[in-house]
């Protein structure tokens, strides 16, 4: 049997396929409210932390990562060294390197500008849902359309929620304590994704370390928690894979 080259497979993956786009939109729809609510809370938090409206709008459009934004805000407010702010955001966003590595086999044939755009709008939930639908990197009709149906509405939901939060930040009373609502929103979104032993182990380890290291200056406990959670999840995943291969 003659294997098709990436160039020959590219049209099947990259050509717009309306049913696949609609399927991606339908799959990601239940998460959009939680994403928008989380963006709303982050937008308010940016203004409450002392950022001007132009600064907050620029941050949400450029960074597009709520966890990194929230991790950086207290450091900015506390006048932490710039290297600490960047290191914290970098470590929190290391998961996107993993996402890119997982998506690369599916879309490596696309032009780099298109891959860069997809990388920018990628989010945790969207990537997870895509990989559930397409665990294999084999070319399939509508694969890119399905991913776009997940990514673009997710990005729009976040930006709309965040921009509304930025604009409302100056009028929302502090006693509303919307940070708690944001925590509930992200928990509701992330719990369904905590499937499998590696992910569960990573969450438990990260939670334990974040509590134990809460007193570290400049919120460095968050850095320690993220690193510990990632390393433990990777270790458990590798161990499970080795055991499966050995007994499989």
Image: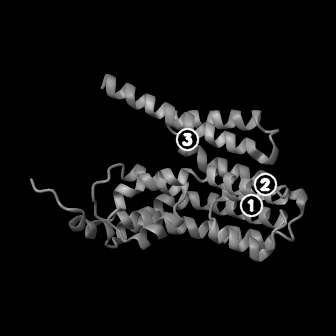
Q: Position of residue 23 (x, y in %)?
A: 41, 63
Q: Would you name the residue on which mark 1 appears?
A: 41
Q: Is residue 128 above or below residue 19?
A: above
Q: Name the residue nearer the viewer: 142 or 74.
A: 74
Question: Which structural element holds mark 2?
Answer: helix
Q: Is residue 35 left or right of residue 141?
A: right
Of the residues under marks 3 and 1, which one precedes in the sequence?
A: 1
Q: Which residue does the numbered mark 2 point to in the structure image?
A: 179
Q: Residue 62 falls in which quadrant of the image?
A: bottom right
Q: Which color scheme is applied?
A: one colour
CA distance separating discs 3 and 1: 23 Å
C-alpha span from label 2 to label 3: 22 Å
Q: Are marks 2 and 3 in contact (CB under 8 Å)?
A: no
- Regarding residue 147, the answer to whether it shows in the image is yes
Q: Are marks 1 and 2 in contact (CB under 8 Å)?
A: yes
Identify the residue at image location x=81%, y=73%: 52
């Amino acid at each position: 049997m003659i294997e098709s080259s990436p160039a020959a497979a590219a049209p099947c993956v990259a050509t717009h396929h309306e049913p696949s786009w609609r399927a991606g939109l339908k799959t990601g729809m239940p998460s959009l409210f939680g994403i928008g609510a989380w963006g709303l809370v982050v937008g308010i938090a940016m203004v409450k932390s002392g950022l001007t409206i132009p600064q907050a709008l620029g941050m949400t459009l450029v960074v597009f990562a709520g966890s990194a934004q929230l991790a950086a805000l207290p450091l900015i407010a506390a006048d932490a060294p710039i290297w600490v702010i960047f290191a914290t955001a970098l470590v929190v966003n290391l998961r996107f390197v993993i996402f890119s590595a997982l998506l690369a086999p599916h879309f490596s044939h696309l032009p780099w500008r298109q891959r860069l755009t997809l990388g920018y709008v990628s989010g945790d939930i969207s990537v997870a849902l895509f990989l559930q639908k397409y665990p294999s990197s084999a070319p399939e009709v509508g694969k890119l359309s399905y991913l776009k149906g997940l990514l673009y509405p997710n990005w729009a939901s976040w930006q709309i929620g965040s921009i509304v939060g930025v604009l409302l930040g100056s009028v929302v009373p502090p006693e509303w304590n919307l940070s708690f609502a944001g925590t509930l929103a992200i928990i509701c979104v992330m719990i369904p994704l905590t499937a499998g032993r590696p992910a569960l182990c990573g969450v438990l380890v990260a939670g334990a370390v974040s509590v134990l290291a809460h007193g570290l200056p400049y919120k460095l406990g968050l850095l320690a928690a993220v690193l510990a959670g990632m390393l433990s999840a990777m270790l458990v995943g590798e161990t499970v894979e080795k055991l499966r291969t050995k007994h499989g």
